[in-house]
Amino acid sequence: MPLLQIHQTGKQSGWAIWHINESETQLENKLIGYPPTDITHENKKLEWLAARHLVLSLANHLGLRYFGIRKDIFGKPFLEKYPHQLSLSHSYPYVAAQIDYDHPVGIDLEQPKEKILRIAPRIFSSIELADAGSDIIKQTVFWCAKEVMFKIHGKGGLHFSSQLNVEPFQLQEEGSLRGIISSEKTEVVTLDYRIEPDYVLVKTKSSDH
């Protein structure tokens, strides 16, 4: 079972990462279900299956039974039969998940790719662009952080460059970020990031229960 990392950050809060190296047949089972028929791409099927295995493993690690994943009207995931907040991210062959007892969470995993340099002017503010420069790793951290804040908000409809903003920071192997979500009200969030050889990970600071 390629459970790459699992971390408990509170009594019923934590996060984990899965590295996919199984076939679809190896991942399928009755407990986690089967990919929806509208998912036809092989890698997308593997991501769907691995995400359920990962949530199952993380839930069990936190002392919770796994009954599946439910989504609200905005598509925000939760643990079935629990109030726990859930966030998922995948960038083949990696899948990440975060569970928190009752606070909105977000987790995002991305592999640094040249496309971020092309889309950055559309999704970053002028301050963020100036801070990241041409550093593809730092740009990926900004991108992940915005995705995390979008997931925390959970209702969609936000403009990435003007309503999801990250304050300038000094890039290290791991550290904290200060994000600002501007919607009906302004919400300040603290995020953690880490730089791994194959990917960048940004996540919400979990509450302790």
Image: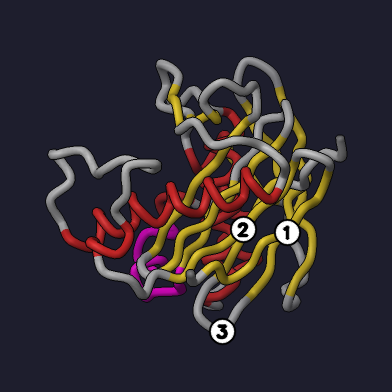
Which stretch is magenta?
Answer: 111-121
Which residue position is annotated with label 2? 16
**Mark drawn on residue 71:** none
Per the image, the residue denoted by label 3 is 197
Q: What amino acid is labelled 2 in the image?
A: Ala
1 or 3: tag closer to the N-terminus:
1
Q: Are marks 1 and 2 in contact (CB under 8 Å)?
A: yes
| Sooner in the amino-acid sequence: mark 1 or mark 2 | 1
User: Is there CB contact under 8 Å for labels 3 and 2?
Assistant: no
Residue furthest out toward the front: 30
Using the image, determine if residue 198 lies above or below residue 52. Answer: below
Distance Cα–Cα, label 1 vs label 2: 6 Å
Residue 189 location, x and y as percent?
A: 75, 39
**Among the 4 quarters of the image, the one containing residue 70:** top left
Is residue 82 shown above or below 90?
A: above
Residue annotated with mark 1: 7
Taking depth in this image into account, of 190 and 185 the one nearest to the observer is 190
